[in-house]
Amino acid sequence: MKFNLKVYCDKTRLKDIREFITEKLKAYVHDDLEINQMVLAVDEICANLIIHSNYCNANEAINLEVFVERDGVTFEISDEGEKFDLKKYKEPSIQEVVQTKKKGGIGLMLVRRIMDKVEFVNKEQKNTCIMHKRFKHQ
């Protein structure tokens, strides 16, 4: 099953994304914790794209595609904003974040722990984050 949502790059649209993901997954996943974790991961990536890649420019948009299969789900989130290079990302240590009281910077670390696979693909002007999560046995 495939679902699609296009939202303009305004932080107020993150609520729409969370509701969309929750609604679509409820038909396939019966564990609220599992749904909430995936919603958190998608929300984090979408927030990063809206804020850092598109600078909250409401004239720009991100596209979210959700592919639900029997054993799991794949999320493809794409935009045409500034690209993100995963090779340049250095995951902070939890101790470093706590000691410096740094706000932010741990979202991608969280996403990587929730999802089974996370990759970023940049082709021409299109940037896509692809995340896959296998369902727990239900």
Image (cartoon, grey):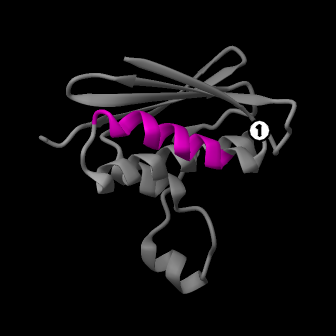
Q: Quadrant of the N terminus?
A: top left
Q: Which residue is mark 1?
A: 9
- Up/down of 84 relative to 39, above or below: above
On-image quarter of the C terminus: top left
Residue lying furthest bottom = 99
- Residue 48: x %, y % from top left: 65, 47
| Whether residue 117 is situated above or below residue 91 in the rendered picture | above
Q: Residue at x 35, y 44 (%)?
A: 115
Q: Which residues are magenta?
A: 14-28
Q: What's under tag 1, amino acid-wise?
A: Cys
Q: As rendered, which of 12 and 78 lies closer to the eye?
A: 12
Q: Residue furthest left?
A: 137
x and y, in percent, of residue 8 in the image: 76, 33
Residue 126 occupies quadrant = top right
Identify the residue shown where x is 68% and y is 32%.
Answer: 83
Residue in the picture at 73% in, 39% down? 53
Q: Is residue 12 left or right of residue 104?
A: right
Residue farthest toward the top in the current orientation of the protein: 124
Point 45% across, 39% down: residue: 23
Instruction: From the viewer's perspective, tell me whether residue 1 is left or right of residue 106.
Output: left
Left or right of residue 119, residue 8 in this image: right
What secondary structure is marked by label 1? loop
Q: Is residue 51 above or below residue 67?
A: below
Q: Is residue 116 left or right of residue 80?
A: left
The crowd level at tag 1 (other Cα within 10 Å; few <14, some 14-19, many 20+) is many
Q: Main secondary structure of the magenta part?
A: helix
